[in-house]
Image (cartoon, helix red, strand yellow):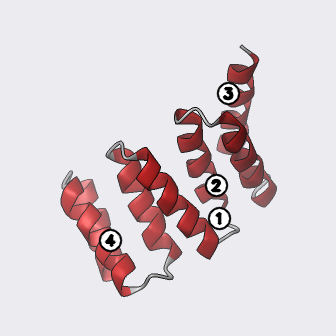
Amino acid sequence: MAYSNMGAILSDLGENNDALKAFKQAIAIDPENPPAYMNLSDMLDDLGKKEEALKAYKKALKLDPVNSRGYLRMANILKELGRKAEALNAYNKAIELDPSNQFAYNHLGLLINDVGD
């Protein structure tokens, strides 16, 4: 928990590489910690490392399969990578897990609109 918190603070300070190291250390200490993987995923995404972020989101969701936010974020990366069918499934899963997730509905609508073009 301490390394995840330190990573979040470092990220807020713009020290992204140090934040990345802290998140990886948090996972090394507790490899079954879904929030640590979510933090790592978010940082990797921010650094433009989409494929690595996707792997970390998948690990987080394997550990916490009811995390709607995780499916939403994973779907966003899949969409950016052009993997629209997978993104569609992930948005739908996010909505299934949290029907009040307005962001998932919005992004799903944008994806459907994009696919229709």
Residue type pointed to by label 2: Tyr
Residue visible at 76% across and 18% down in the picture: 116
In front: mark 4 or mark 1? 4
Of callouts 1 and 3, the N-terminal one: 1
Helix or strand or loop: what does disc 3 sit on? helix
Question: Does residue 29 sit above or below 52 in this rendering?
Answer: below
Q: Amino acid at mark 1?
A: Asn
The residue under label 3 is which amino acid type? Leu
Q: CA distance from mark 4 to mark 1?
A: 20 Å
Viewed as shown, does residue 116 lie left or right of 61? right
**Residue under label 3:** 110
- Considering only vertical position in the picture, is 30 above or below 56? below
Task: Tell me how far mark 4 sits from mark 2, CA to CA.
Answer: 21 Å
Looking at the picture, tell me which residue is in the foreground, 24 or 69.
24
Q: Which residue is mark 4?
A: 24
Under mark 4, the amino acid is Lys
Task: Give the label on residue 67, or none.
Answer: 1
Q: Residue at x 64, y 54 (%)?
A: 71
Q: Residues within 10 Å of mark 4 (few under 14, many from 20)?
A: many
Q: Earlier in the sequence, mark 3 or mark 2?
A: 2
In-image side of 106 versus 77 (left or right): right
Q: Which residue is mark 2?
A: 71
Residues at marks 1 and 2 touching, judged by CB atoms closer than 8 Å: yes
- Residue 14 in percent (x, y) is at 21, 51
